[in-house]
Image (spheres, rainbow, N blue to C red):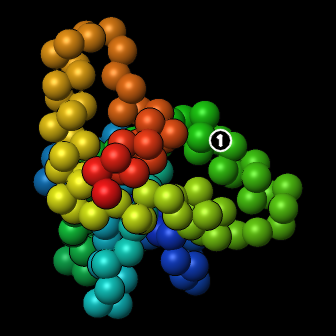
Amino acid sequence: MKYYQALPVRKVPQVYLTYAYHSELTRGKLVDINIRGKLEQAVIIGEVSESQLKFDKSKIKLVSNIYNYNISENSLIFLKLFSQNTFNSINLSLSCFLRPLKLITQKQWKSLSEFKYEQKNKNSGYSPIENTQFLLDRYITLR
């Protein structure tokens, strides 16, 4: 079991929450986490070693769902700087950043991941699914 710091979209008393998952998650991965019985989107910020945990491991919840979408390192840096310069919480900035992606349903996420797989087979060097604008254009055509 691996432990990760997640930045939830919803503002909570702590900026980062600790969640567990049985396999490797990369920094910037978009996931669903359970906060007080509700599924909320979050972004994985980094891995936490077991020695850094200061509370009981049995109380750590599992990541509920993993999306086939990564936020780039540059976008995470921009998000942090944007929240500092506008005096907003980083959770609120992340919520605004991910708002267009919330419109995409689970069925459409599956369709996008299949399309990504097809594009990887066609063009091994370039995957347009990583571009957010492409995601939104593809969402509009799926509607």
Q: Is residue 124 visible?
A: yes
Q: Nearer the viewer, residue 64 or 54?
A: 64
Residue that mark 1 sits on: 77
For the view shown, which residue lies furthest in the bottom direction? Answer: 36
Name the spot of residue 85 as percent of width and height, x first. 85, 56
- Image quarter for residue 88? bottom right
Name the spot of residue 29 as percent of width and height, x first. 37, 47
Name the spot of residue 90 as percent of width and height, x first. 65, 63
Q: Is residue 107 above or below residue 28?
A: below
- Image quarter for residue 5? bottom left
Considering the image in quadrants, where does the C terminus appear? bottom left
Name the spot of residue 53 as percent of width and height, x first. 38, 64
Q: Residue at x 56, y 66 (%)?
A: 95
Mark 1 Cα-neighbour bin, 10 Å: few <14, some 14–19, many ≥20: few
Q: Is residue 20 visible?
A: no
Callout 1 secondary element: helix
Q: Residue at x 17, y 28 (%)?
A: 117
Considering the image in quadrants, where does the N terminus appear? bottom left
Name the kind of residue labelled 1 in the image: Ile
Q: How many marks?
A: 1
Query: Is 124 on the left or on the right of 46, as rendered?
Result: left
Q: Nearer the viewer, residue 134 or 25?
A: 134
Query: Is 115 on the left or on the right of 136, as rendered?
Result: left
Q: Nearer the viewer, residue 50 or 2?
A: 2
Query: Is 14 on the left or on the right of 134, as rendered?
Result: right
Q: Residue at x 38, y 74 (%)?
A: 40
Q: Residue at x 41, y 32 (%)?
A: 130
Q: Nearer the viewer, residue 142 or 16?
A: 142
Q: Is residue 51 above or below residue 121?
A: below
Q: Is residue 132 above or below residue 66?
A: above
